[in-house]
């Protein structure tokens, strides 16, 4: 049924939240600002790193102070982004199953494009046909601009493409692109958010996703 499957990255393929939280709290502690729990960071991510920095820093900072915090965060995160990050349990097996079924797969992330590709290739070498991260001249998800660019790159059609993500941003991205969307519960958000955003499917375990492709191993 689905010839192409497009995945979100953070919270869907990779559990990156501990490294993101550590980087954010490193910046906060260095400035004497309040630090945040991992669960709080789960509510802050999803709209790109600059927006994440705005959310974990105190209100009322100047543009220069925000820019400084962003630079500090980026430097620390880039040095520690693989300390605790790992694929979610069952995801590598899911990807192998989908690949065996003949599905063509890609990644669309609000992580910076220059970073997204190497991260995906590091954890999932040779699995994805294309990785599209955030670009300075294009709007972020849930705007469908980069989704459509990615789909053009891999020859995907809306009626035969499944979008997979863990947040309302992902669900809205897929819907804005005219795609069927599967929301996953092992990431950063909950069922109420995914259903409220209009997910067509909400799945609890990676192996459930293989059945949605409508293919068999035969």
Image (cartoon, rainbow, N blue to C red):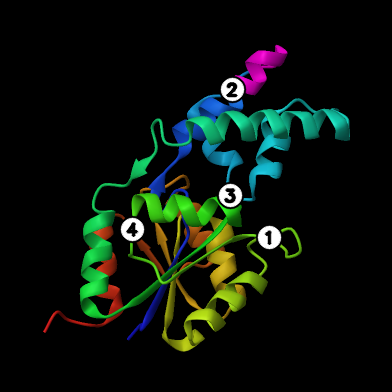
Q: Is residue 99 left or right of residue 5?
A: left
- Please report whichever mark, 2 or 1, sits nearer to the chain's N-terminal start: 2
Q: Residues under labels 4 and 2: Cα distance?
A: 30 Å
Alpha carbon distance from label 4 to label 3:
24 Å
Please give the label number shown on residue 125: 4
Is-magenta flag for residue 29?
yes
Q: Is residue 193 left or right of residue 91?
A: right
Span highlighted in magenta in the image: 26-34
Which x, y percent locates residue 42? 52, 39
Magenta segment, prevailing SS (helix, strand or loop): helix
| Neighbour tally class for label 4: few under 14, some 14-19, many 20 plus, Cα within 10 Å | few
> First in sequence: mark 4 or mark 2?
2
Q: Residue at x 48, y 61 (%)?
A: 195
The mark that comes first in sequence, 4 or 3, is: 3
- Between label 4 and label 1, give the one nearer the viewer: 4
Cβ–Cβ under 8 Å for marks 4 and 2: no
Q: Which residue is mark 2?
A: 25
Q: Nearer the viewer, mark 2 or mark 1?
A: 1
Q: Which residue was labeled with disc 1?
A: 135
Q: Quadrant of the C terminus?
A: bottom left
User: How many numbered discs, if any?
Assistant: 4
Which residue sits furthest left? 218
Considering depth in this image, is 79 or 47 the residue closer to the camera?
A: 79
> What secondary structure is found at the residue carrying circle 1?
loop
- The Cα atoms of the two marked residues, 2 and 1, are separated by 26 Å
- Measure the C-alpha gap from mark 4 to mark 1: 23 Å
* Residue that numbered label 3 is attached to: 46
x and y, in percent, of residue 156 in the image: 47, 84
Labels 2 and 3 touching (C-beta < 8 A): no
Q: Nearer the viewer, residue 186 or 23?
A: 23
- Kindly identify which numbered label has been placed on residue 53: none
Point out the frontmost of discs 3 and 1.
1
């Amino acid at each position: 049924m689905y010839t192409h499957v497009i995945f979100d990255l953070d919270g869907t393929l990779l559990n990156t939240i501990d490294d993101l939280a550590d980087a954010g709290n490193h910046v906060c502690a260095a400035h004497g600002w309040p630090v945040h729990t991992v669960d709080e960071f789960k509510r802050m991510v999803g709209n790109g790193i600059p927006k994440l920095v705005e959310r974990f820093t105190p209100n009322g900072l100047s543009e220069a102070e925000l820019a400084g915090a962003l630079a500090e965060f980026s430097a620390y995160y880039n040095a520690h982004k693989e300390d605790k990050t790992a694929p979610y349990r069952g995801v590598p097996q899911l990807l192998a199953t989908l690949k065996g079924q003949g599905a063509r797969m890609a990644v669309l992330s609000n992580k910076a494009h220059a970073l997204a590709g190497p991260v995906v290739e590091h954890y999932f070498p040779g699995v994805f046909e294309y990785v599209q991260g955030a670009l300075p001249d294009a709007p972020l998800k849930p705007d469908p601009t980069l989704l459509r660019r990615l789909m053009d790159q891999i020859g995907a059609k809306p009626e035969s493409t499944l979008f997979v993500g863990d947040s309302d941003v992902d669900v809205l991205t897929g819907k804005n692109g005219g795609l069927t969307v599967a929301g996953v519960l092992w990431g950063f958000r909950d069922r109420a958010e995914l259903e409220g955003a209009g997910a067509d499917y909400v799945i609890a375990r990676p192996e459930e996703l293989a059945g949605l492709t409508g293919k068999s191993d035969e």
